[in-house]
Amino acid sequence: MIELNADIGEGCDDASLMPYLARVSIACGGHAGDAASMTAALQLAAEYGVAVGAHPGYPDRARFGRRALAASEEDIAAWVTQQLETLAEQAARLGLRLAHVKPHGALYNTAAQDERVARAIARGVAVLDPALILLGLSGSQLIAAGRAAGLPVLNEAFADRRYRADGQLVSRETPGALIASPDLAAQQAHALAHGEPVSAFSGATIWVQADTICLHSDTPGALKIARAVHAALNRG
């Protein structure tokens, strides 16, 4: 079965999702997260035997990292490295090691299309640990930058988000961008996992490579979605 992942440590009910996940990305101080929330998330992941990774974002808590900030490549790389170091230190105290990195929000979406931002993120990760897996939007600039930097990569797809015809994600600000129906999310995840086409927001048919599938803990009905997606994938 293809693995499921989720972003945690952002103030949602993470514990309920853990039985369905293989990998979690933990907010590490940019858009959200502090020492207490990072420790709690790491302990939760350890309890369920789930791989842990960092979820760095633009340092903009007021807007939850969902708006791009003008910044140099050096600044972006430094932000990423600093946030990874913060989480890695918390993990080391618990005898854990980070397995991957997945940017958050606007940093993730910008890096999907902007080679400069993608390159900066990959550099920030490689400086800390070139063995860390970089998760990025499937087929995006971030995946290409990760490979160019010598990082292992995972093409990420989404069960609870709508796609544009070009394979990018529909903006969260667009009505209908989130898939809140457990049945529809399960159908999309099943198609992604089996290399089948999915319907874009425009009605076009697209194919998306999926090495890992994401569920969002802040999507309405997240637990019901997780159960439905997990069951659909287990059916093969």
Image (cartoon, rainbow, N blue to C red):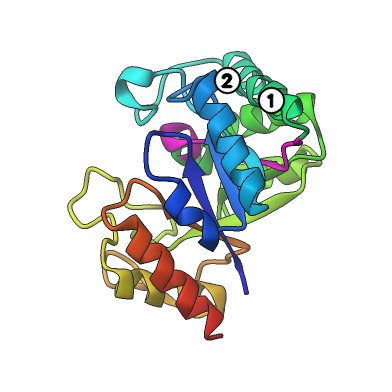
Dot 2 lies on which element? Answer: helix
Q: Nearer the viewer, residue 202 or 124?
A: 124
Residue 124 — which label? Answer: 1
CB under 8 Å between discs 1 and 2: yes
Answer whether residue 122 is magenta in the image: no
The quadrant the C terminus occupies is bottom right
**Range shown magenta:** 96-108
Q: Nearer the viewer, residue 39 or 213?
A: 39
**Badge 2: residue crowd in 10 Å (few <14, some 14–19, many ≥20):** many
User: Is 172 placed left or right of 51 in the picture?
Assistant: left
**In the rendered image, the vertical position of residue 71 relative to residue 196, given as above or below:** above
**Badge 1: residue crowd in 10 Å (few <14, some 14–19, many ≥20):** many
Residue picked out by circle 2:
76
Label tally: 2
**In the rendered image, the vertical position of residue 192 relative to residue 105, given as above or below:** below
Q: Extreme bottom residue here?
A: 235
Mark 1 or mark 2: whose residue is earlier in sequence: 2
Location of residue 181 by image quarter: bottom left
Point 49% across, 44% down: residue: 7
Amino acid, disc 1: Gly
Point 31% across, 69% down: residue: 182
